[in-house]
């Protein structure tokens, strides 16, 4: 095997970003959802949600604030929508009212996500650039999974700044970790004729296009974020999670927020 250099980001394209038919993209996204399940790709976001919910409940009881509306969560680059459906099931189990919105620049991805959703799903979808999407405004929580390796650093700075302004409770980015071990493991896992033909080459390219902790430290600083306001964690087998929780004054439970005015609505409960 040729020794690859993981010290810098590779400038290579992914086939799923090129022109392809709706049927081809849908088949690829469906297999990506299977791969997400096998590699527990949504695990870091689900853990973070548990944590955010606990601290939102604590904040609310400390300030005697009550929740006016369901927690609004925007998933940026939602693709097939599998993570949103997992969040919808998670929220239903915990009796947490949530307004879930998936945004993707690719209209065919949104079409596939809508088609894959069960009839009972209340997840909403929108096509477009999330930073300019009116429906994505006033979010409490923002999630971004496996998207940032598709973006340039300047696009990521813009996204970080938008999330910092928009998320009232917090945001999380999870993406692949540019390291040789995940690369080798994925190379074996994605072998096999049953996978869509984009999965293996795009997955390997994604790991080489992804970031390391020092990249996130640099990009968050460039976006004007304080170092102690951002948490960066490694999650096995191959992910980095970058997250930030807004100060209480910015959040729904803070003294300036719309939440402090109502007493007739129920606080989401963590079971
Ligand atoms: C690898 S897929 C990940 C999909 C899904 N989030 C997941 O975890 O499986 C990347 C998705 O990001 C979308 N995307 C890429 N650039 C984007 C941007 N600037 N804004 C919104 N979505 C974007 C693509 O259209 C694609 O659907």
Image (spheres, rainbow, N blue to C red):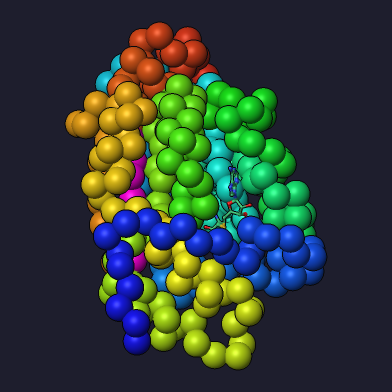
Q: Residue at x 65, y 46 (%)?
A: 104
Residue in the image at 41% along x and 77% along y: 186
Assess whether residue 66 is covered by the magenta stretch. Answer: no
Q: Quadrant of residue 81?
A: bottom right
Q: Where is residue 255, by image quadrant?
A: top left
Q: Which residues are magenta?
A: 238-244
Residue 28 visible in the snapshot: yes
| Main SS category, magenta section | strand
In the rendered image, the quadrant that contains the N terminus is bottom left
Residue 175, percent from left and from top: 41, 55
Identify whether 142 is placed above or below 201: above
**Could you say where residue 111 lies in the image, as x and y percent from the top left?**
77, 54
* Image spot of residue 217 (x, y percent): 26, 40
User: Residue drawn at (50%, 61%), measured in percent from left and top?
Assistant: 12
Q: Relative to the observer, which residue lies in front, 191 or 269?
A: 191
Residue at 62%, 66% in the rendered image: 15
Compared across the picture, whether 121 is left or right of 74 comes to right
Quarter location, residue 3: bottom left
């Amino acid at each position: 095997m040729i020794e690859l250099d993981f010290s810098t980001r590779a400038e290579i394209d992914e086939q799923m970003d090129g022109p392809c038919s709706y049927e081809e993209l849908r088949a690829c996204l469906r297999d990506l959802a299977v791969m997400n399940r096998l590699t527990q790709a949504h695990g870091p976001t689900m853990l973070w949600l548990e944590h955010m919910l606990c601290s939102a409940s604590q904040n609310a009881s400390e300030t005697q604030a009550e929740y006016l509306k369901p927690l609004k969560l925007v998933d940026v680059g939602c693709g097939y929508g599998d993570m949103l459906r997992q969040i919808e099931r998670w929220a239903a189990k915990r009796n947490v009212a949530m307004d879930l919105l998936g945004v993707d620049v690719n209209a065919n991805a949104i079409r596939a996500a809508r088609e894959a959703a069960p009839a009972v799903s209340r997840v909403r979808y929108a096509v477009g650039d999330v930073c300019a999407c009116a429906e994505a405004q006033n979010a409490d929580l923002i999630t971004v999974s496996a998207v940032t390796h598709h973006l340039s650093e300047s696009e990521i700075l813009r996204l970080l700044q938008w999330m910092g302004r928009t998320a009232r409770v917090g945001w999380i980015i999870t993406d692949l970790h540019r390291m040789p071990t995940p690369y080798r493991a994925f190379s074996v896992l994605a072998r096999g004729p049953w996978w869509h033909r984009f999965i293996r080459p795009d997955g390997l390219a994604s790991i080489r296009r992804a970031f390391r902790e020092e990249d996130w430290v640099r990009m968050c600083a460039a976006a004007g974020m304080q170092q102690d306001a951002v948490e960066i964690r490694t999650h096995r087998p191959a992910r980095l999670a970058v997250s930030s929780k807004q100060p209480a004054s910015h959040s729904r439970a803070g003294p300036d927020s719309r939440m402090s005015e109502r007493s007739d609505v129920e606080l989401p409960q963590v079971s």
